Image (cartoon, rainbow, N blue to C red):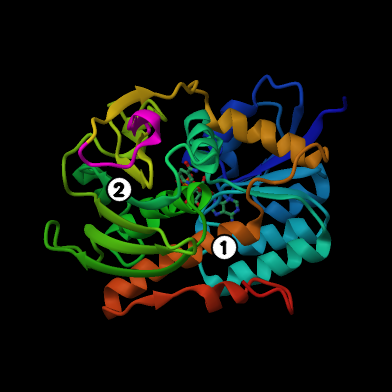
Amino acid sequence: MKSIAIGVIGAGLIGRKHLAKLAGRADYDLVGIADVNADRVAADHPGIPVFADCQKLLDEARPEAVIIASPNQLHAEQGIACARRGVHILIEKPVTDTVETAASLTAEVRKAGIQSLVGHHRRHHQQVRTLKAALGEKRIGDVVGVSAIWATHKPAAYFETAPWRAQAGGGPILINLIHEIDFLRFTIGEIVAVQAAASNRQRGFAVEDTAAALIEFDSGALGTFFISDSAVSPWTSEQGLGEAPEFPFSGESNYRFLGRSGSIEFPALVQWTQAGGAQDWNKPIEARRIHAASIDPYVAQLDHFRDIIRGQAQSLQPVEDGARSLIATLAVAEAAASGQRVDLRHRYDALAPTGEAF
Ligand SMILES: NC(=O)c1ccc[n+]([C@@H]2O[C@H](COP(=O)([O-])OP(=O)(O)OC[C@H]3O[C@@H](n4cnc5c(N)ncnc54)[C@H](O)[C@@H]3O)[C@@H](O)[C@H]2O)c1
């Protein structure tokens, strides 16, 4: 089958990772890269056309598909430029930087009829797929709730090299919690309301270093989430999954999914149930491991992008779904600032075409 002519916009931290995963694949043909730092990028990629301007990449290299890995504020504009040329997009998370720009991008993608996939790569882990299937098959009955922690201590250099991370928008809610919110939406279902509190007491930055959220799902399930970038612990998804070499593997579970007839620790995928499906606190409870292979989620994400471009699969996350994860995450920050419960149902309506309410 013909390879897919692909371009990459933004060759920074994650753009370089995508480029490394594309190397040597027969199903993709890298036809160009766009980055404002064109000279640096060209030196790293001899033989590949590099453009300082993404419009030039689109018009001169004429890719069929593009990976957008530029700063958040550019996602909407660059995604719309691709949609208007009929170019399919794999767009990094968050899908855009605001709800308004996410709605504009969603409208343009729908109008153009291109394929879109948001880079919430965690959806492509085999452990995540296995958990989703186990919950869907009701192995622990209806989900009653979830208890989650994401806590690690980011080093001082993380903030010194990028001072924006100490300002509004640079804290763990918008940078890290968005992945976890997306994971919870993917595995449990839609989030309909949030409450939250946040603190900056540990680092004293303008932005939060710690937050706690109460999450309501459409199914009636409830969740609690504690997140901090100022506490040493083995309980982050990155450490538990062994997702990337920069986060040493802990194998520890940072999630507990609680159901009517059992519970599951994740990512270790330890299932707790009682014999014969009993639901009785006086009966013993036993643990068993559910097996799931460990695969590279970024490679699996590229496999899936290829399949949706070729019409062999439906996108696991089109832009409007990524916009919902953005809406729910921004709502956590808003709830923490206002102290009010934020209802999300009407906010999702902004993304739906007329008559297609949440
Ligand atoms: N899925 C993940 O695991 C993951 C991890 C990190 C970052 N991200 C997301 O990826 C995006 C990029 O993050 P990063 O950490 O790689 O940032 P980065 O700053 O390391 O890289 C951004 C790159 O975009 C380039 N750029 C800036 N303006 C541009 C323009 N107008 N046109 C083309 N290129 C331009 C920069 O020169 C830089 O090379 C963000 O949206 C971020 O949230 C996702």
73 sits left or right of 320 in the view? left
Where the N terminus falls, by quadrant? top right
Q: Look at label 2 and name its amino acid.
A: Ala
SS of the residue under disc 2: strand
> Residue at 70% of width from left, 31% of height from top?
48
Where the C terminus falls, by quadrant? bottom right
150 sits left or right of 186 in the view? left
Q: Does 278 appear in magenta?
A: yes
Q: Which labelled disc corresponds to residue 147?
A: none
Please state the horizontal and vertical placement of residue 189, each as a whole percent of the image. Answer: 51, 55
103 sits left or right of 70 in the view? right
Residue 57 visible here: yes
Q: Which residues are magenta?
A: 267-282
Please state the horizontal and vertical placement of residue 31, each as a whole percent of the image. Answer: 76, 35
> Residue at 16% of width from left, 40% of height from top?
232
Q: Which labelled disc corresponds to residue 323?
A: 1
Spatial distance from mark 2 to mark 1, Cα to Cα? 22 Å
> Residue at 20% of width from left, 43% of height from top?
153
Q: Which labelled disc corresponds to residue 148?
A: 2
SS of the residue under disc 1: helix
Q: Quadrant of residue 301?
A: top right
Please state the horizontal and vertical placement of residue 295, each as a whole percent of the image. Answer: 52, 23
Q: Nearer the viewer, residue 49 or 321?
A: 321
Q: Look at label 1 and name its amino acid.
A: Ala
Q: Does 31 appear in magenta?
A: no
Residue 268 visible here: no
Q: Quadrant of residue 251?
A: top left
Q: Nearer the viewer, mark 2 or mark 1?
A: 2
